[in-house]
Image: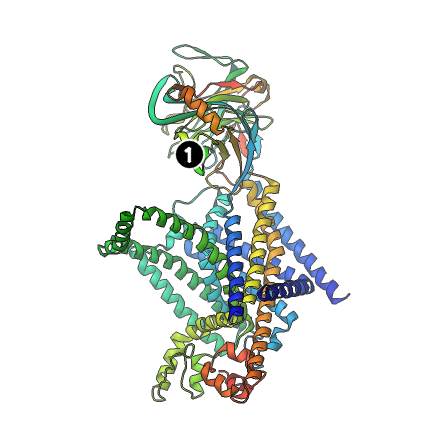
């Protein structure tokens, strides 16, 4: 093999090596940044929030066009429905944080509506503000979704912005 | 028309020679560019991973990354230089350490290299990029910027000063050990230590400058500096011209457009050419070398000879070597290299600037073209798409740049030799003595590089092989 | 001597040319700017935006609440933002450009949840000279960014249009709304 051809072979080998390392590392970064959702068995306990040791259980997931509060009945817009998720949780010593998204099977994610989104108040609290040691308190998370998505719901999972890692995103599924 | 013709011929020579040498050296240059890029990326990524452990470790890894990058540039320049046979055109003695010692080359080029990068903010950009890499990896941003750790405030000042002095001492010790044993890895350790030292000085020095500026702004005498401006404004207002507006516009035109352009398109190419000449070795003797040979020292461009008697020699020699070794190894050669380049002629200077400018602009446009082709994406996409683009652009542009530097330097030498030959031809007899006294022949690269072919003995004491 | 002068002149011209090239190249803007017109839908990641129209006035009411009266003019641009992708973005930045100046908005745009759209107004406060040639920019850029898409919608206001608008509605009251959420049909 001539000197020149040997040099080009070295280029090819080096190129492949560098490309492999770049693609490998890039793939690893991508895997860390992309959430992969794993559904837990219906009604089971899991810790969906990354970084918080807070076991949660989805008690019920109700789809309704009317949201009843102490003041009035809030009807969702035409083509939309309310989803009411009741979650049991055990707050950790440092306090809990529950910002769970409602995930559909096609990957769409809705964040919960705060109390400004509807008139009046409901019975259960909307944030995980209970102190530890008070049993397993309940929180109610309310979502507004298009009607067409109501049959494709997968469950509740953590919002993915600040987490980097390859742990699965546990998705709470309702009992039954 | 003659200047234009000579510009075109210089351009033609630069472009065609660069193209031919680039093609001939392409495989080796590609390997060098790829490995240099990979090495830098590995250490830069490592710096981002350890930054929440300690900013010092992070900076150490970053400085190793820069040493790797510089090594790649040096190797690339030498490959191109071999092809052009630059070595044959320079009158270095056969045992000059530049020839086989990579660490020697690193040690003399590291300071100018990092200095160039500091001037063009590459180092602060790299330190800021650590934050981006950290975010991409851990999803969090840290509260204080990496650079602010090196902000000398209060107790932090003494820590930084202590680290700087400590590193300087360590580097000198390792260097002395290396010179005694010749154990190669020690040379690399020296280079890394020096790189770390320079980076801390540059990053914290910047902050010191800002602090000094703020201190000056707080002083009362600062107001005195404004008086001329107010006076001028008053004078012009009698004429009815709002001078402050005009000055503001001129000032913004200068600082926003012209000065950055000058720095990027005129100063930067010249600095890189000076760095290349350091790598190839214009003949410069250190003041200590001359002293040991028993001649009076002439430090500087021959303007004022500093004559020091023999009595103080022994004591002062050691002192000088310890602290001014840097001065001789780095500052003088860079200055001499600049003089070599600038003395070759205006047309060549113009042709070189045009080539370098078009090359760097082309590189920037190529990079932007790739980004525009892909379109806007979230940062998590770019975290794995940007490195391949960067690699591709660098593999295309860097070898071309190295070859251009080598070609330009070689052309400088040839032109300079031709000019000196011309001068000798027009000055019969007296030519030798005029040059040896008039241009400060002892220790000046510009003279010796060109005049070797004529009078090696009297003008080039170094060629006698007595380099210390 | 003339010869040397010529050489240095050529060198100076080369420097000037390179400085000009550097100024023309400029800095890397980190945005991929695309143009759109009124009524044309443009996409920014998971959401689309379309500018429906604009109006000017001097008094501003937002959601039927009095906001203020300006000495210059308010420009209210009506946009519809729809999210047909998978997640709602929280990093939208709306701005305006005219005559080389940039304008900011007081209230940010509401980006709806997936499957919904929202028709709302964006309000700029600007001097009458800046109305002609006004361009609204929508940018989805996170705090850490590399290269994000931006939509530039030129409202297509010529100097004549601006003059006519001033004649008609300079002192009008602008009623803006932050809109309500609707399902995308």
| Depth check, front residue: B394 or B63 | B394
> Where is residue C85 shown, x and y percent of the image?
57, 28
Relative to residue C93, is residue B253 depicted above or below?
Answer: below
Q: Is residue A54 visible to us here?
A: yes
**Other-residue count near label 1 (Cα within 10 Å), few / some / many at <14 / 14–19 / ≥20:** some
Q: How is the image coloured?
A: rainbow
Q: Residue furthest top?
A: A72
**Subunit of mark 1?**
C
Q: How many marks?
A: 1
Q: Residue furthest left?
A: B220
> Where is residue B258 shown, x and y percent of the image?
45, 54
Q: Residue furthest right?
A: A1
Relative to residue C160, is residue B405 depicted above or below?
Answer: below
> Where is residue C133 shown, x and y percent of the image?
48, 32
Task: Tell whether C115 sits left or right of B26.
Answer: left
| Depth check, front residue: B253 or C28 | B253
- SS under mark 1: strand
| Depth check, front residue: B279 or B443 | B443
Relative to residue A152, is residue B56 depicted above or below?
Answer: below
The residue pinned by badge 1 equals C103
Task: Tell whether A175 sits left or right of C107.
Answer: right
> Where is residue B154 shown, x and y percent of the image?
28, 55
Q: What residue sits 58% from the left and 20% below the top?
A: A149
Q: What residue sits 50% from the left and 77% below the top?
A: B445
Quadrant location of the N terminus of chain B in the rendered image? bottom right
Q: Quadrant of residue B416?
A: bottom right
Relative to residue B71, is residue A149 depicted above or below?
Answer: above
Q: What residue sits 51% from the left and 88% below the top?
A: B430
Q: Is residue B45 visible to us here?
A: no
């Amino acid at each position: 093999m001539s000197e020149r051809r040997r040099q080009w072979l070295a280029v090819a080998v080096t190129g492949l090596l560098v490309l492999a390392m770049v693609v490998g590392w890039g793939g690893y970064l991508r895997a860390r940044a992309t959430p992969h959702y794993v559904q837990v068995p219906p009604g089971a306990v899991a810790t969906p929030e990354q970084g918080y040791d807070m076991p949660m259980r989805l008690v019920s997931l109700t789809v309704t066009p009317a949201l009843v509060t102490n003041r009035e009945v809030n009807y969702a817009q035409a083509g939309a429905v309310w989803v009411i998720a009741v979650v049991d949780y055990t707050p950790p010593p440092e306090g809990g944080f529950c910002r769970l998204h409602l995930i559909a099977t096609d990957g769409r994610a809705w964040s919960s509506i705060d109390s400004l989104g509807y008139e009046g108040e409901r019975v259960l609290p909307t944030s995980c503000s209970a102190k530890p040691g008070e049993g397993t308190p309940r929180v109610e998370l309310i979502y507004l979704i298009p009607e067409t998505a109501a049959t494709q719901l997968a469950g509740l999972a953590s919002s993915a912005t600040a987490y980097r890692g390859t742990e699965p995103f546990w998705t709470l599924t309702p009992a039954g | 028309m003659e200047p234009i013709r000579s510009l075109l011929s210089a351009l033609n020579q630069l472009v065609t020679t660069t193209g031919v040498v680039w093609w001939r050296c392409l495989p080796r240059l590609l390997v060098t560019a790829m490995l240099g890029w990979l090495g830098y990326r590995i250490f830069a990524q490592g710096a981002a991973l350890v930054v929440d452990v300690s900013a010092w470790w992070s900076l150490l890894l970053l400085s190793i990354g820069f040493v790797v990058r510089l090594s790649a540039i040096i190797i690339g320049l030498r490959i191109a230089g071999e092809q052009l046979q630059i070595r044959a055109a320079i009158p270095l003695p056969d045992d000059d350490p530049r020839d086989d010692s990579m660490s020697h080359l690193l040690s003399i080029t590291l300071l100018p290299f990092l200095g160039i990068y500091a001037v063009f903010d590459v180092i602060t950009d790299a330190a800021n990029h650590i934050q981006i890499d950290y975010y991409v990896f851990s999803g969090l941003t840290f509260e204080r910027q990496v650079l602010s750790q090196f902000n000398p405030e209060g107790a932090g000042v003494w820590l930084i000063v202590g680290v700087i002095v400590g590193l300087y001492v360590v580097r000198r010790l390792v260097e002395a050990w290396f010179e005694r044993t010749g154990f190669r890895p020690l040379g690399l350790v020296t280079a890394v230590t020096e790189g770390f030292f320079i980076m801390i000085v540059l990053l914290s020095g910047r902050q010191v400058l800002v602090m000094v500026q703020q201190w000056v702004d707080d002083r009362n005498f600062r107001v005195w500096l404004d008086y001329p401006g107010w006076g001028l404004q008053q004078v012009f207002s009698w004429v009815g011209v709002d001078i402050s507006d005009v000055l503001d516009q001129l000032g913004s035109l200068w600082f926003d457009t012209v000065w950055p352009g000058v720095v990027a398109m005129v100063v930067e190419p010249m600095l890189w050419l000076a760095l290349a000449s350091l790598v190839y070795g214009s003949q410069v003797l250190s003041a200590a070398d001359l002293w040991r040979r028993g001649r009076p020292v002439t430090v500087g461009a021959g303007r004022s000879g500093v004559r020091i008697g023999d009595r103080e020699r022994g004591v002062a020699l050691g002192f000088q070597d310890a602290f001014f070794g840097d001065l001789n190894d780095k500052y003088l050669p860079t200055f001499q290299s600049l003089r070599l380049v600038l003395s070759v002629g205006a047309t060549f200077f113009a042709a070189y600037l045009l080539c370098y400018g078009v090359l760097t602009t082309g590189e920037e446009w190529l990079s932007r073209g790739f980004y525009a082709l892909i379109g806007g994406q979230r940062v998590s996409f770019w975290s794995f798409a940007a490195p391949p683009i960067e690699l591709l652009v660098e593999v295309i542009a860097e070898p071309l740049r190295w070859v251009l530097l080598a070609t330009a330097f070689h052309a400088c030498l040839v032109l300079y030799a031709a000019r000196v030959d011309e001068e000798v031809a027009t000055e019969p007899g007296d030519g030798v003595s005029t040059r040896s006294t008039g241009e400060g022949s002892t220790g000046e690269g510009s003279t010796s590089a060109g005049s070797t072919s004529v009078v090696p003995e009297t003008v080039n004491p170094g060629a006698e092989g007595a380099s210390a | 001597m003339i010869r040397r002068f010529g050489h240095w002149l050529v060198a100076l011209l080369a420097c000037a040319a390179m400085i000009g090239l550097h100024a023309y190249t400029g800095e890397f803007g980190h945005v991929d700017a695309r143009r759109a017109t009124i009524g044309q839908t443009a996409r920014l990641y998971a959401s689309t935006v379309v500018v429906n129209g604009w109006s000017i006035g001097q008094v501003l009411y937002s959601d039927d609440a009095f906001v203020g009266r300006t000495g210059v003019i308010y420009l209210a641009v009506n946009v519809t933002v729809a999210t047909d992708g998978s997640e709602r973005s929280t990093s939208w930045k709306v701005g305006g450009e005219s005559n080389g100046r940039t304008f900011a908005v007081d209230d940010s745009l509401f980006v709806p949840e997936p499957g919904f759209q929202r028709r709302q107004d964006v309000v700029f406060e600007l001097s009458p000279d800046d109305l002609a040639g006004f361009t609204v920019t929508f940018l989805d850029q996170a705090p850490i960014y590399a290269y994000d898409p931006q939509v530039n919608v030129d409202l297509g206001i010529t100097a004549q249009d601006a003059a006519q608008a001033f004649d008609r509605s300079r002192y009008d009251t602008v009623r803006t709304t932050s809109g309500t959420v609707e399902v995308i049909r």
